[in-house]
Amino acid sequence: MKVKKGMLARRDFVVATVAAGTALLSGCGSSRRGGWEFLSERDARTLKAICDQIIPADDFPSASQAGVVDFIDRQLVRHFRHHRSAYRDGLQRADALSRKLYGGELAVLTPARQLEVVQAIEQENRTFFELVRNHTLDGYYGPPRHGGNRDAVSWRMLGLAEPPVLGRSPSEQKKGPAS
Amino acid sequence: MKRVNAVVIGAGAAGGIVAKELSVAGLSVVLLERGPWYTSNDCRKDDLRNQRTTVLGNAFGPEDEGNPRVSVDPNGDARVVLPSEGNYQNNAACVGGGTLSYGAMAWRYLPQDFRMRSTYGVPRGSSLEDWPISYDDLEPFYDKAEYEIGVSGDYSGTPFHGPRRRPLPMPPLPPNREFQILWPAARRLGLHPFHIPMARNSVPYNGRAACMRCRWCVGFACEVDAKNGSQNTVIPIALATGNCELRTECMAKEILTDDRGHARGVTYFDARGRLQEQSCDFVVVSACAIESARLLLNSKSRLFPNGLGNRYDQVGRNLQGHHYTGAVGFFGFDTYDDVGPGASIAITDYNHGTTGLCGGGLLANEFIRLPIQMIDRLPPTVSRWGMGHKQAMRAYFKRNIMIFGPTQQIPAADARVTLDPSVKDKWGMPVARISGNVHPHTFEIGEKQAQRAEAWLKEAGAISTFHFAGRPQIVSAGQHQAGTCRMGTDPKVSVVDRDCRIHDVDNVFVIDSSVHVTNGGFNPALTIMAVAYMASAALVRNWKGTGFR
């Protein structure tokens, strides 16, 4: 199929904006109106636990609080399509490892135990861990439009003016996620 | 389709210039470009989808769908790679080519860069060679490129450059904070810092605005059109002559030759995927080093069973780009001022003249950083994830400077482009198969350059530093790809002559970075442009209405 690139990008953008709005309405928790685009509820819980060890909360939000799970889920039906089986398989193995070490799925463990399990995942399933690590940082430090840097929190954290003083057209500011 | 004088394949740095020079001289030209024509309206500032950070794909082509290549590692393991993956060695696919979204450094190579073999001899296992043209031959065309494309900067701080007939047409942008920190440090070290020449308007020029100094520069199209590429300079002039027709989203398939080995036209797939044939008097291939070689190799006929110009198995060899090395320094104060393009100060003291090393390269500060570019630039002692990583991002984002540069590569004949025997693109054509490695002497030069970058940062007051100078086991090409259709006098070891004409075909020319014998210790864009002006001048001079003199 031949689709003009500009059109495709615009359609993606509309979907992304609508989804970001939905996520904002539902707050920072894992509950979502309309469910996930790719992940199962269980996969999403496990992924959230891993993402929040990669970027934990301090006085600025954690990865999932900033929308990183939404970002990854959304891209798994778009640009990350070829990583679907890696996620499905990796998240299952993560929970299996968690049950083996602490007798329960990753999402229900204490933060200290979650950290230990994630460290174990890094050792035992390095390829998967690197994938999630990179996608988590991409989502969190990337532009807000993709849903993983909600309200430009990471840019504010780094002390960058948002919206930027220079370099964003007025039309784009209107279309961007609420800030 | 009406016959034209010339078909130019590829509307990038070189093809745009050739199309302009020919059409202004009155020749009829069809300019084929496989990508679309983006404008500043398409300039979406997406940190994850641009031409440098491609987590969500390339902003300016090619698309991941239907454009594979094959990458072969040193163990011989072949893997299909997508355009947004590093080993694809992508440049861009659009009108303007790489010059739409480049950082726009506009360097002249140094006189020694054209005489590498004479200067250094030939390191074992390399194909180091002199160009058949000199810096002095190219100087008038460097000058023309600087004025027609538009370059700002100031060379007056350094003696390490070739002779110039006049200063650059535009002054440099006012110095940013990193410039102010690095300038006195370089002077204390006895170095000669100066303002990087950039194809970027520092003042209104050629009817377009000056740079507004935003954060989204290298990898992005310029929102105010202050960055100068072929798409906003020479191509509009070519079209305005009425002699040049630009056909976008048209993918060249093959150069057709007649029974006497003379090119008679080009077949291509148009925007709707239909096969078209355009007849012409001569053909100019300007598709960039990898795709130009691929097109010649795909143009097989009875007289050229191994591809056009490939009688001696030279097409596709000597693929080279740049091995980047350098250092990052961390400071006790803010170095970040949110003023683009960021890259501002350079030295060329180390491009030549180091005992035991065959060359060197420029060192310059890096372009302004986006947050995403900082995630793997933290001190090596910092955890790669977790609370430590997050806190380090906060501590160091505004307090670091990176200095690095392109090490001049020592070319090797086995770093090359061939056709993959099985993988095809969406048009059914065999794709480029990229194999070989960087010559090891390149790594030795790179290591030294990284140490020098680190010393500069320490002198500037960095509290801690680290340098990076890997030995990637993969060919280097990417946006600086060059060398695959070497210019030379001996047909057995080169592909084109000094006029960029293929040795054994009198009306096919390769005019782009493919012809670079060596690639300098500099970003190659301005040299690509100068060679294009020079080769175009020869074309126009030799063209006699129906054939070449």
Image (spheres, grey):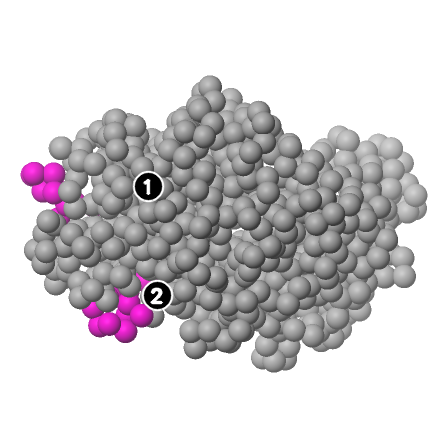
Examine the rendered structure and indicate whether residue A100 appears above or below residue B255: above
Magenta residues span B237-264
Residue B153: x %, y % from top left: 54, 61
- Please check the rendered image and state whether residue B260 is part of the magenta-colored stretch, yes or no: yes
* Residue B32 visible in rendering: no
Report whether B161 appears left or right of B484: right
Three-letter amino acid code at the position of disc 1: Ile
Question: Label 2's element?
Answer: helix
Residue B284 or residue A65, whichever sits in front: B284
Residue drawn at (46%, 73%), measured in percent from left and top? B205
Marked residue nearer the N-terminal end (1 or 2): 1
Residue drawn at (55%, 34%), measured in percent from left and top? B353
Residue lying furthest top: B124
Question: What mark, if any, has residue B234 been given in the picture?
Answer: 2
* Label 2 Cα crowd, 10 Å radius (few <14 / some 14-19 / many 20+): many
* Residue A109 visible in rendering: yes
Asked whether the beta carbons under mark 1 and mark 2 sit within 8 Å of each other, the answer is no
* Label 1 Cα crowd, 10 Å radius (few <14 / some 14-19 / many 20+): some
The N terminus of chain A, quarter of image: bottom left
Residue A80: x %, y % from top left: 58, 50
Residue B473: x %, y % from top left: 56, 29
Three-letter amino acid code at the position of disc 2: Val
Q: Chain of mark 1?
A: B
Report whether B516 appears left or right of B219: left
Q: Which residue is mark 1?
A: B133
